[in-house]
Image: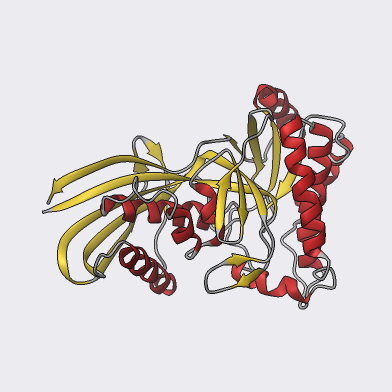
Amino acid sequence: MGFAVRVRAPSNIALIKYMGKSDPELNIPSNPSLSLTLNSLCTWTELEQIQDGGEFRLEWNGAARMEDVELLPFDLREKDRPKIERHFKRVFQFFGHSFSGHWRVRSGNTFPAGAGIASSASGFSALTLAIAAALGRDRSAQAELPQLSRQGSGSSCRSFQGPWVLWQGENATKLSTNFDSLSDIVFLIEKSEKTVGSTEAHLRVKSSPLWEKRNERVSFRIQELQGCLLMGNWSGFSQLVWEEAMDMHELFHTSSPSFSYWTPLTREILGWLESEGVRSGKVRAAVTLDAGPNVHLLIPQCDQRYWLDKIKARYPELELLVDQEGPGAQVVWHAEGLK
């Protein structure tokens, strides 16, 4: 007899960035990061056991719909299969389960994968939770799941809880704050897979002359940002978030070899938002970017309609993704006795 589970896990957007690794094998970051967990920008994953025992076998299929949610099917590339199978083995062994059986995965995203919206974070947190749930360990091992997931994709450890998460070393913990509930408006400038992947970016930034003082800058910003979240200080929050996003991209621009994710439209949108007072903290809004060209505008949920109207008037042809902060990954259903 087999069983099946279905889970959903959100992406997250770092305000203080994870950049560089002190231990590449375990994905231990060179500096702490602070992130906002999203909600509907997520990965849906269904895991079914077809056969118990025998040689490990993995079927992977993209899913176009789950729970009446339209998805972009996530199809596993053959070059990524070894990494996924290693993760199955990692989680199985952690829970004392043999690396065996015939397993079927169906998965899809609500946003384009590989475009700099942390699809590896949502994907690996969903897969880790699904495997644990299939083994009946998702509730008894909640503290261990982010650490297990981190070894597959570093930033995935921040997607298990929310809305605010601090990741230091091996541990990701939920933060208490007194800040406004936020919406995230994503300017979807590019949907294609980024030319320099995250793993390569983590390596290259260490060649930048700006890398040497990176930890000092992060230590200051992360302390100041936590203060802003506790005090509800929008002005300080906006300025720190802008500075940190530009800091990360300057590492890219000054590495050897240098690279950039920005397009002309990225630069134009950043200039427009700066002219609207976002960089200076004159308005309740903050701008950040992940390792990609797409711009994230964080705003109070009560101001969402105002900003959407303003953006659409300025960029009527540009596609927007709109989301709000969320609580983290969750099991949607768990069914036993399926054949």
Q: Residue at x 67, y 68 (%)?
A: 20
> Horizontal and vertical percent for residue 289?
71, 50
> Horizontal and vertical percent for residue 280?
89, 38
Q: Is 102 left or right of 315, judged from the image as shown?
A: left
Where 13 sits versus 24, above or below? Answer: above
**Picture quarter containing residue 23?**
bottom right
Where 96 sits versus 130, above or below? Answer: below
Q: Residue at x 84, y 68 (%)?
A: 210
The figure's colour scheme reads: secondary structure
Whether residue 259 is visible: yes
Q: Quadrant of the N terminus?
A: bottom left
Q: Residue at x 76, y 52 (%)?
A: 245
The residue nearer to you, when weighing 82 against 114, is 82
> Horizontal and vertical percent for residue 117?
59, 51
Whether residue 264 is visible: no
> Horizontal and vertical percent for residue 150?
50, 60
Where 67 sits versus 338, above or below? Answer: above
